[in-house]
């Protein structure tokens, strides 16, 4: 039996939320998608996520919200990371920060194991994402359960790898080939054209892209980003404003997965303008 997954790239601010709410529900219906993962780490005006954005993303049809380095921006949301099983932070932060890095959800008889990892090349050098997936001895009490789940061998494994380095992302994709059904990169906000099914059945893309105003700089106002780059002063970034010539876009992938084999059979890029 084939099941269908939609993964959506980083939702950036109000323009991203608005286009997600407009385009995702009909897309889910049109594709007859079984499961939806949305990266929401930039949903709160570009920086982090709060209860408001969480509710809007879930209402738009997401089953799971993944995040990344910006998940810590809104401290008022930290307690919710502990109680809300549908929102993940990267699993490979050292120590025992609030929240969870993976979750298991059963929906319509299919078990989905979603794991959020973060890269450490050109980023904060947190724990090894490869080891976080593979080596239970480095993980905490949650990880023991994680290992058991993998041994049960009946869940479809999805990975959102929030990382800057293309090399690190491709390396993890090959490392998890045959172990995860999907390894999808996030973080750069620029969709890559390298979607493929790897030799052992893992659907891979270096970056899903973003959901927001593509006419800006990674969804933010271009003028401010130029000023920051030219002066190295950390001027406050604001979301790019949509214009008729630069409407918001929904970007991500659709993946068909053989449920029994737990392997991908196809991957297709999504880039839909409002
Ligand atoms: Fe992001």
Image: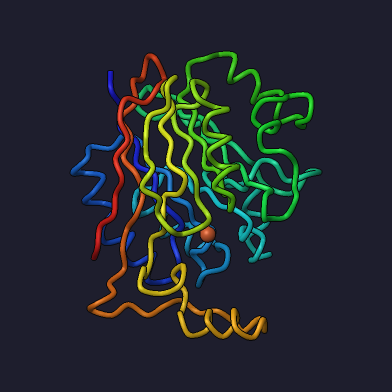
Residue beneath the point at 64% across and 26% down: 146
Viewed as shown, does residue 124 lie left or right of 21? right
Considering only vertical position in the picture, is 32 above or below 90?
A: above
Residue beneath the point at 46% across and 67% down: 218
258, 225: nearer the viewer:
225
In this rendering, the count of numbered labels is: 0
Write down the quadrant of residue 156 in the picture.
top left
Write down the quadrant of residue 258 in the picture.
top left
Residue beneath the point at 36% across and 47% down: 193
Location of the N terminus (image quadrant): top left
Viewed as shown, does residue 274 lie left or right of 200? left
269, 103: nearer the viewer:
269
Write down the quadrant of residue 11 in the picture.
bottom left
In the displayed orientation, state which residue is furthest to the right. 95
Coloration mode? rainbow
Considering only vertical position in the picture, is 31 above or below 54?
A: above
State the image coordinates of residue 234 (x, y, percent, origin top left): 66, 81
In the displayed orientation, state which residue is furthest to the left. 30
Residue beneath the point at 23% across and 65% down: 274
State the image coordinates of residue 50 (x, y, percent, origin top left): 55, 63
State the image coordinates of residue 82 (x, y, percent, origin top left): 66, 47
State the image coordinates of residue 140 (x, y, percent, origin top left): 77, 32
Considering only vertical position in the picture, is 151 above or below 171?
A: above
């Amino acid at each position: 039996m084939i099941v269908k997954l939609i993964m959506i790239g980083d939702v950036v601010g109000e323009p991203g939320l608005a286009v997600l709410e407009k385009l995702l529900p009909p897309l889910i219906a049109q594709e007859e998608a079984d499961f939806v993962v949305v990266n929401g780490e930039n949903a709160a005006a570009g920086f982090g996520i709060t209860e408001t954005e969480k509710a809007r993303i879930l209402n738009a049809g997401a089953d799971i919200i993944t995040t990344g380095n910006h998940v810590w921006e809104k401290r008022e949301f930290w307690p919710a990371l502990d109680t809300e099983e549908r929102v993940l932070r990267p699993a490979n932060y050292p120590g025992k920060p609030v929240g969870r890095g993976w979750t298991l959800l059963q929906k319509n008889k299919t078990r989905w194991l979603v794991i959020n990892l973060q890269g450490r090349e050109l980023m904060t050098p947190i724990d090894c994402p490869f080891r976080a997936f593979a080596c239970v001895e480095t993980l905490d009490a949650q990880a023991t359960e994680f290992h058991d789940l993998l041994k049960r061998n009946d869940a479809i494994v999805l990975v959102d790898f929030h990382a800057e380095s293309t090399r690190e992302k491709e390396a993890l994709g090959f490392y998890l080939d045959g172990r995860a059904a999907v390894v999808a990169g996030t973080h750069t906000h620029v969709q890559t054209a390298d979607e493929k099914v790897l030799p052992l059945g893992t659907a891979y893309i270096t970056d899903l892209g973003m959901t927001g105003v593509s006419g800006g700089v990674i969804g933010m106002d271009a003028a401010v980003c130029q000023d920051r780059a030219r002066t190295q002063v950390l001027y406050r970034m604001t979301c790019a404003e949509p214009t008729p010539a630069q409407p918001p876009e929904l970007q991500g992938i659709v993946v068909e997965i053989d449920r029994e084999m737990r392997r991908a059979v196809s991957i297709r890029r999504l880039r839909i303008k409002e």
